[in-house]
Amino acid sequence: MKLATLKAGGRDGTLVVVSKDLQHCQRVPHLANTLQVALDNWDDIAPKLAAIYSALNDGLRDAEAFDQTQCHSPLPRAYQWADGSAYVNHVELVRRARGATMPPEFWTDPLMYQGGSDSFVGPTDAIVARDAAWGIDLEGEVAVITGDVPMGASVETCAAQIKLLMLVNDVTLRNLIPAELAKGFGFLQSKPATAFSPVAVTPDELGAAWDGRRLHRPLVCTVRGEAFGHPDCGVDMVFDFAQLISHVAKTRELEAGSVVGSGTISNVDRSKGSACIVERRTLEQLENGSPTTPYLDEGDSVRIEMFDADGKSIFGAIAQTVKLLA
């Protein structure tokens, strides 16, 4: 099934069930006002939501039109947002461009940072920054929303707790990163508010594209109205989602509604393009000695979307434009 959160209804929005074709939706206040409430009671509520989803797809009469521009991220805020870097090819490229070697443990132990989860933004909200000189970049990713995961959970247990999937634009301010990392304490200012796709979907909705741990579909990224990349999310993913969740759970519990991201989708096959500007700039530097693709500036647009085998949008689109504060 497909679920979304309308902005109307307060800080945590209003949960709606969305039809498969993303044309209609149904509010479900009798079951759960918000997605977090549904996740907190998933075993009881999910089957009832699924029944409404089935009715929607059969032409439920009192359904309302679904407008993606009225959506917040499926979880407007979350108890946990942990983002990995599962596509080690991307990490290796960026490090090579700056002359840094790749520690061998990067291939066996996931990189991960803990992001700010108190202020996600909607999928069509602006990318707001104060200065284009900060190096504004998109990062196209996939994320999962978990149920309750106990500390020390096995990879198998973690796989079973993947409740929903969604797309991500994990905006990064590239030129703020070096000074932050030099402090030895990780990202903060260089990672502003993250946006997620209008719709989150249950794993069964993905059919054969979901193998239980990886999503095997291209992520289509457009920058400034031009095709930028379509890397396949199931290719070159060194750490799958179950492994990423287990990594987080090594020393803590994850509460229902925790969000775990894949990191920037990246394929070794260069013909697939990129899901972030810094990767293209890195390739330009390695091939030509200097990057030529600029980071984002006022009015620049990005679009991140995924289509099924029939060419239909699965999650709706993240479609954002940069807005610089005066």
Image (cartoon, rainbow, N blue to C red):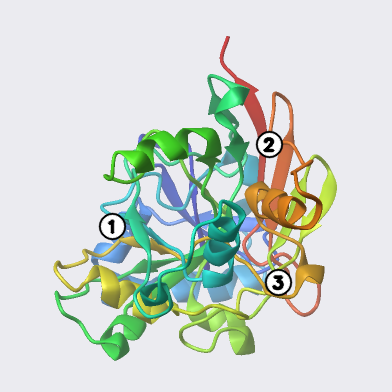
CA gap between label 2 and label 1 equals 38 Å
Residue pointed to by mark 3? 218
CA gap between label 1 and label 3 equals 31 Å
Visible in this render: residue 12?
no
Vertical side of 268 occupied by 286: above or below: above
Expressed as whole percent of the image width and height from the top left, the position of residue 281 reads 71, 48
- First reached walking from the N terminus: tag 2 or tag 3: 3
Vertical side of 180 occupied by 134: above or below: above
Visible in this render: residue 245?
yes
| SS state under label 1 | helix
Mark in the foreground, 2 or 1: 2
Amino acid type at image mark 2? Tyr
Mark in the foreground, 2 or 3: 2
Amino acid type at image mark 1? Val
Amino acid type at image mark 3? Pro
Q: Of 114 and 96, which appears nearest the observer? A: 96
Q: Is the C terminus in the top left, top right, bottom left or bottom right quadrant?
A: top right
Number of residues whose C-alpha sits closer than 10 Å to that of mark 3, classed few (under 14), some (14–19) or many (20 or more): some
- First reached walking from the N terminus: tag 1 or tag 3: 1
292 to the left or right of 184: right
Residue furthest top as drawn: 326
Asked where in the image residue 272 lies, by quadrant, the reply is bottom right
- First reached walking from the N terminus: tag 2 or tag 1: 1
Expressed as whole percent of the image width and height from the top left, the position of residue 60 reads 61, 65
